Structures are given as structure tokens and as C-alpha cells.
Image (spheres, rainbow, N blue to C red):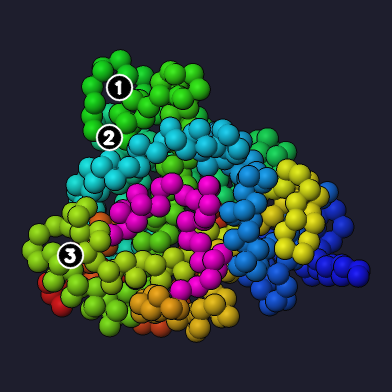
Amino acid sequence: MTSTAPPPIPRAAGSFPLIGHALKMRDNLGFIDSLRETREPLVEIVLQPGTRTIVVQDPALIHQMLKPLAPSLDKGRLYDKLGQLLGDSVVTATGRDHVRRRRQLQPAFAHTEISRYVDLMRAEVTATVAAWERGQPLDVHEAMVGLSLDMLAKTVFAGSLDDAVFRRLRSNVSVVMSGVGLRMMLPDWAERLPLPFNRRFDQARAEVRATISTAVDELHASGHDTGDMLSTLLRTIDEETGEPLTAHQICSEIFLLAVAGTETTASLLSWTLYELARNPAIEARVLAELDEVLGERPVTFDDMIRLPYLDRVITETLRLHHPGWLVTRRTTEETRLGEWTLPAGTELAYCQHALHRDPERFPDPLTFDPDRWTDPAQEPPPGAFVPFGDGKHKCMGDRFSLTEMVTALATMLRSVRLELAEGQVIRQVARLTVRPRNLRMTVRPRAAL
């Protein structure tokens, strides 16, 4: 009895010699999204000459890639590039190094630590909302980037930076955050061109690292525990050396958290506020739940599990507007994925944004419907909904991010209402994350409604 050979993996249309799919990647999200129309489980694309990238579209194969096959895969080209730009960290590490780094950082994201951060987060949200001019338009994504940076910086450096240093750090991180998505897609030689964009990015990156390193040195010398994440990391021991983490190690971890974590939270908050403005009945249900659970008091960490409808709203935002547009892995040896045998060095990728909009798994996928998450029987199959990844590389900051989201929304929504202009159409753009383009909303006082 002879075995049947698997079908060949098709190559996406629009590839040219030498440049591959570079022209298609000008609309990177639209291109990756269009691959779903092929209904193929695997599709080949060319992101750089000589490198084969396979986009995995079938949830069962994505699940296989993230869990059973995880030990034989490393992070892939995009994570290599991220490591070059921001430094080696738990996000870019692989193998034993990743396991070791994950154990080192786990205490900073423990339940007890996150519960201490909520008061700091809430204070930043309250101050931010108070500064918004009522009746005036607000660039929502820019406001959420600023808020996310403030929340993260206060939880990481609560007692470690004075106001002037904090403002400079905030500005420099914003420059890095704006540029890192483009840098990740450019060839290495383009980074060396003497362009203003490159000079601004390089200078801001160097200043961020210098600020974090100085904060680490000063806090270490003082011997004080300021109750922030930086203090927690200073107490962490490297299990291989038995020594505390070095300033360089701490700097790299915080740097990547500041850039990737801030942009992700900002995009999710922006999309959630957009959908609530478009769906007043859903917003009313959120407000009713907040009123019932919180009354007149502020939100606390214990409330995170007492707000199930708000949780479903956030889950639905993660489905419809997931900020991640491409996640990569790479085979380190000959690897069997479903029917196909892939050689070592094959780049694998999947797109959460496209995956979560698949009509076969999510009926009426473009409709924002938090109630689709009420029936456990309708839960998508493994690999179909992976908002924080899965397996050993699942995002370790997922609980931190969700706590930021709940704290920010529960605080903002009871103070103000953000109103969309009639007929306003918001388009999405994929840079480091999938974010809304030109999302401007008018700030209205909640009490006046």
C-alpha cells in the first residue's frame, strides 16, 4: 500500500523575482488577510529573497505549531529583528534560555504583584481623563498611547524616576514605539542609512536604555524597595549563576515590555472605545454592570473577576481587533506539520487578526458581539482563538495587560463618554500592531448625559 504525497504548498500571487512579495507588503495586513480566501491550510510567501515563509491558516496546525512542536521551533526572523532593535529578552529568547528567563520574570507578574499595581494604574487614568477638554475632539489612539505609557512607567518605576526624567523617558519610548514596526520590516542595510528617521530612532533608543540603566543603578545603590516592578526584578536571582540579574538584563526586559506592551494596550483600548461608541446598547450594559458592582467606589483588583460582561467586551475586542498581525516561528530541524515535512530553516507565521475573523469559526465575524462568548458549547477549537499565543511561549504579561484594560475602562467610562462623528469611518493600519488610523472622538461629560 503506497502513501499519498501531500498536496504542494501554493505560493501567494504577486511574487516577483528578487523582491518576492515586497510590493504586496505595502498593505501588509490586507495582503495577509487576503490569503484566507485561498482556503489553503498553508500558503507560501516571500518576505526576503532566499527565505521561505509558510503562513499557517488552519487552527489545528497553528495549535500543533504552538504546543506539540514548540520544542523544535525557535522564534523566527521577526523576533530576531526585534532582538536586534531592542535587545535580547524573554520575548525573543528560545529553548532553555527562554525557560530560564521566563522563570526569572514570573515573580514580577504574579497575582500579588499585579494587585499592588492597580492603584497606580487607576491614578494615572483618573489624571489623564481629568485633563481632557470636555466638548473637544480627542485623538484617541495618541491619548491611549500616552495613558498606556504612563500606567506602565508608574508600575515599573513608581518610586524611581523624578518628573523630568519620566517625561523624557515617555517621549523617547514613544519615538522608539513609532519606529520599531517599520524597522522590523526593513532590510538591515536600510538601518545604516544617514536618514533623520534613523538618527531619531537610534538616539531615542540609546536614551531609553541609559535612563533605565541609571534607574537600576540608583535603586540598587539605595537598597530601598519602592514597591514597583523594578524593585521586584532587582530581587530576582539568575538560576544559572546564583547572582542577581544584571542591569543590562533588566534594561532589556523593561525596554521590550515598554515598547511592545504599551502599543498593544493602547491599540486594544482604542478599539474598545470605538466599538462602545458605535454600539450604545453594549456601552449601556457595561455601565449598568459597573454601577451594580462598584457603586460609587473605584475599581480594585478584586473586581477583575466580578465584571463578566466587561470581560466579554474585552475578549470580543481581542477577537475582532487583535493588535497582532504576524507571529513567526522557525524550524530548527526537519519538522512534520500536518501532512507536510518542512526542512530546517523554514519560517512559519500566522496572523491572529485574520484567524480571529474566520467566518467558519466565528459566525458574522465583522459584527462586534460580546454575547458570542456566553455559550461554552460555542467555544472555538484549539488554535482558532489565541489572543496571547499558546504553549510555552504564551505571553506572560496577559494578566497584567487585562488588568490594565479593566482598570482603564472601568475608570474612564464612568467619567466621560467618547462620541464618534456621524458617518465617521475608521480604517486600520498595521505597524507594530494593528491600530486605528485617525480615530478622533469628542469628549462628553458622563454626568451630562
Q: In this figure, which residue is indicated by the disc labeled 3?
A: 415
Total count of labels? 3
Mark 1 residue crowding within 10 angstroms, few (<14) / some (14–19) / many (20+): many
Residue 294's spot in the image, x, y percent? 13, 64
Q: Secondary structure at mark 1?
A: helix
How far is the residue under mark 2 from the one under mark 1?
11 Å
Residue 233, by quadrant, is: top left
On screen, 429 above or below 110? below
Seen from the viewer's position, the closer of residues 174 and 74 is 74
Residue at 63% across / 44% down in the picture?
Answer: 71
Residue 53, by quadrant, is: bottom right
Residue 257 visible at all: yes
Which residue is most to the top? Answer: 221
Residue 208 visible at all: no
Amino acid type, mark 2: Asp
Q: Earlier in the sequence, mark 2 or mark 1?
A: 1
Residue at 27% across / 76% down in the picture?
Answer: 283
Residue 252's spot in the image, x, y percent? 48, 32
Residue 157's spot in the image, x, y percent? 30, 34
Q: In this figure, which residue is indicated by the disc labeled 2?
A: 228
Question: Is 168 placed left or right of 336 in the picture?
Answer: left
Q: Secondary structure at mark 3?
A: loop
Residue 219: numbered disc: 1
Mark 3 residue crowding within 10 angstroms, few (<14) / some (14–19) / many (20+): some
Residue 427: numbered disc: none
Label 2 or label 3, whichever lies nearer to me, is: 2
Residue span colored magenta: 379-406
Q: Secondary structure at mark 2?
A: loop
Question: Is 138 placed left or right of 291 in the picture?
Answer: right
